[in-house]
Image (tube, rainbow, N blue to C red):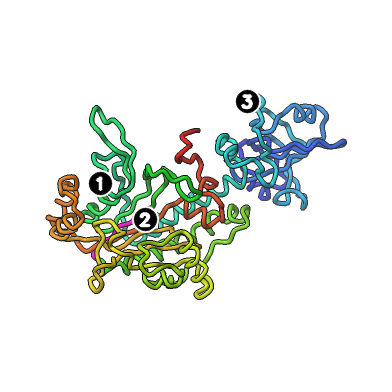
Amino acid sequence: MQRILSAELPAHVGATVRLAGWVHRRRLLKSVAFLILRDAAGLAQVVVAAPAVREQVEALTEETVVEVVGTVVANPTAPAGVEVVEPTVRPLGPPAVPPPFDLYRPVLTATLPTQLDNAPTALRHPSRSAALRISAAAVSGFRATLDGQGFVEVHTPKVVASSTESGANVFALDWFGRPAYLAQSPQFYKQLMVGVFERVYEVGPVFRAEPHDTVRHLAQYTSLDVELGFVTDHRDVMAVLRGTLAGMMATVAERAGGALATLGVTAPEVPAEIPAVHFTDALKIAGAPADEPDLAPAHERALGEWALREHGSDFLFVTGYPMAKRPFYTHPDPARPAYSNGFDLLFRGVELVTGGQRLHQHADYLAALAARGEPVEPYAGYVDAFRHGMPPHGGFAIGLERFVARLTGAANVREVTAFPRDLHRLTP
């Protein structure tokens, strides 16, 4: 008899079926016992009346893996309107050691550090696994949307020879006796791959050795990177980003609707045109000094509230960041060279995406590095490629965990990360 999942039970009323999963909960009443079985698709209610089977169920512990064979009957009060009766129950392993918290309760009451210390079992709770299902659906939507627009997925090195991509700190390691570093970003490589495929994207880990200890930063996170050639300016990049976000949201709604419902979340609509403000105007809206070089978290929150109030949008583009706050490869605004053809996308008042147009001419790279007093040699392998012809191009990067945290309303990005790595945590 082939195993079926709990979600398939309504299609088998009157039939004998085989289920397998974890003992989610046991309810031992005087005349009858209920075994709640959990599998990848959800929960199934198993009604136990036979004394021998009840005795067996009483000996089980929560999270023990079992197989159940029984008959499916309709019951409007049971999960999905069906339950399994007259079962046989067979353990598929020894009794499980129960975790230090109750997984059957609607809310996981353990503190976040306790959950993270016990992640292999805490992630079994529907609220924690729901966030990971949303994450998986978001990545699926990201890939599908870009595949449909002629993008090619690439895979770039995560160990690099120099730590030159940005001012962020890096993790050093020993590479067969030579110094090497964990990559902070696929930025240089995805630009070079524009010279091969014109349109590329990557889903992969990035590493930041910045000593942040906040609810929105991780030392390792998943970056959804995009780069495209033959753009007019950063607005072409913003248009692709808008379509990509819409595709991600649609796939989350389609493939992870149950997970959204578990968390009581509705995926927001991505506007046909996301509102945009220039950095100088953003400072005014946020009530920041006119000479402020960047947006602080409080400014971002104020801008998020403004976008929702004035435009009914959870999203807001801030364009034209000062060149002094952008990497050397950023293309300046031809009309206002002190400002960039770069942007951030705020999602519910938090920076989610950074992107923009890049320089594409070799001479401009030499000039940009010289203007910042940086030598060319550490960048030689990267800069040299622009001698061989590169189109005007640009791109962006989305932080996956931050996206899911903002979507679900999680207070801490670690709540939606399976095994977070940060300033303090390197296990499990």
Q: Residue at x 56, y 55 (%)?
A: 408
Dots 1, 3 in contact, CB < 8 A: no
Q: Nearer the viewer, mark 2 or mark 3?
A: 2
Q: Is the magenta stretch mostly helix, strand or loop?
A: strand
State the extent of the magenta-drawn residues as a range: 225-230
Task: Estimate the spatial distance between the alpha carbons at disc 1 and disc 3, rounded to whole Å.
Answer: 51 Å
Residue 346 located left or right of residue 377 = right
Spot occupied by residue 48 in the image (x, y as percentages of width and height): 79, 36
Which residue is pictured at 27% across the width and 43% down the height? 163
Q: Is residue 420 magenta?
A: no
State the image coordinates of residue 241 (x, y, percent, origin top left). 38, 63
Spatial distance from mark 2 to mark 3, Cα to Cα? 44 Å
Q: Is mark 1 on a helix, strand or loop?
A: loop
Q: Is 182 situated above or below 267?
A: above
Q: Which of 334 and 97 is in front in this view?
A: 334
Find the distance from the CA under tag 1 to the CA under tag 2: 18 Å
Q: Name the residue under label 2.
A: 397
Type of amino acid under label 2: Ala
Q: What is the quadrant of residue 395 in the picture?
A: bottom left
Q: Mark 1 points at which residue?
A: 164
